[in-house]
Amino acid sequence: MSGAIIALGRVRGCVPLHFPIFPPMRRTLVVPDVLLLGTLLAGLLLLSGCEGDYRPRAVGPIGEITVVMDSSHWTGPSGEALRANVTPWVETLPVSERSFQLRHLELTDERTYERVQDLKNVIIAAPLSDSTNETSFLRRRLSDEAEQAILDGQTAVVPKPNLWRRSQRIYYVAAASPDALAETFQSQGTQIRDTFTEATLQRMDRNMYEDDRRSALEDTLMQRHGFAVNMQSDFQIAVDTTTGSEGFVWLRRLLAQTRREFFVYYVEDVSPDQITPEWIYNTRDSLTRRHLRGNVRGFAKIDYRRPLKTEQRSFLDRYAYDSRGLWYMVAPLGGGNELRPVGGGGPFVNYTFYDQATDRVYMLDGSIFAPDNDKIDLLRQMEVMARTFRTAEGSRSPDASPTAAK
């Protein structure tokens, strides 16, 4: 397989007005001149470009991807490759969850197509060797040159942000054969997932902070520590302390069925070379033993019996370690050093990095306790909160891109 085609032909304007596989019935309709003029003006405004976009936002569960694919491929190697690479199981949760929930549809009629146009996250995929509705849909959007290139062995993985609605992420995926389609998801599934994840975090940022901020507390953090993160209105500062060259702030959101914890730790005079996964784990355990204690007894600790993953990545334009795993409450057994579980636990996400502007090592850590809920979307809220981090010396964390968030 050679590279991916990224240009499709015959896609006219921002909003396709009908589904060509199921053409609308011809009707004769008498329209008053004034109404006709208004309708034409509205249509011109809608199709004059995507600037000043007043279309409704896409709908649907925030953590769901709809896959439009013929059922024979959905249950075959192509569907298996999509599930394994676009929505793999997340093992660093108490019970494994898929990175996105999946919903399967076939383009059986006009009504189904209209439903698809409303949704947040959509993949429309087909091999061009088929004669299915999904294949016909993609063929009609390919130039002759692009179609021939695919039949000759190229693949097409084409993002179409905000195609029919605002805050929407659509992918067209085409290949010559079913086997080639499966190989496409195997080779490019991670990139597709990353795009959906980024769009999801941007949407969550807007939902969390558009009308719900504790700006006064954020200003307090900036004045006292030289950094801030966005806080929803029901977050409280549980611990705020500085000792010598270190600082620690623990933020909490306590609701009836869930608990969210977020802490920021920073230390000066630490070389970036000292930051390793082991340093991160030991530092986190030391901090939670001191500060994140139970109401009656015990303290939070990383559960090393379960999957624990650390990766290097770029975070807010900084070189960082991204760590994910599980925490649980423990207490000393008798008078010795042995620890025993005392109940409670959940997932955490941790970003640790060196900030050159402040000459500090920062650790941003979000964890949740939600025994009766799915965890992945709650943990994403902690990721969104971490992404709002900014310092007095640097600029604010990057705003959500208007492509996906509006």
Image: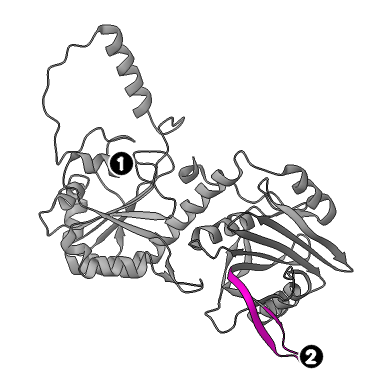
Residue 395 located left or right of residue 313: right
Q: What scheme was used to colour the molecule?
A: one colour
**Residue at point 66%, 78% (across, down):** 281
Vertical position of residue 280 compared to residue 129: above or below: below
Q: Which residues are magenta?
A: 330-347
Q: Where 227 sits versus 29, above or below?
A: below
Residue 95 locus on image (x, y percent):
46, 72
Q: Who is closer to the viewer here, 13 or 19?
A: 19
Q: Residue at x 50, y 42 (%)?
A: 402
Mark positioned earlier in the residue sequence (1 or 2): 1
Q: Amino acid at mark 1?
A: Gln
Q: Main secondary structure of the magenta part?
A: strand
Query: As rendered, which of 237 and 265 lies closer to the eye?
Result: 237
Q: In percent of the image, x 12 and y 21: which residue is there?
A: 27
Q: Which residue position is annotated with label 1?
A: 117
Where the N terminus falls, by quadrant?
bottom left
Image-based side of 235 in relation to 323, left or right: right
Q: Is residue 87 magenta?
A: no
Looking at the rendered image, the disc whose residue lies closer to the viewer, 1 or 2, is: 2
Q: Secondary structure at mark 1?
A: helix
Picture coordinates of residue 133, whole percent (x, y): 15, 49
**Can residue 358 be seen at all in this image of the molecule?**
yes
The secondary structure type at the circle numbered 2 is loop
Which residue in the structure is indicated by mark 2? Answer: 335
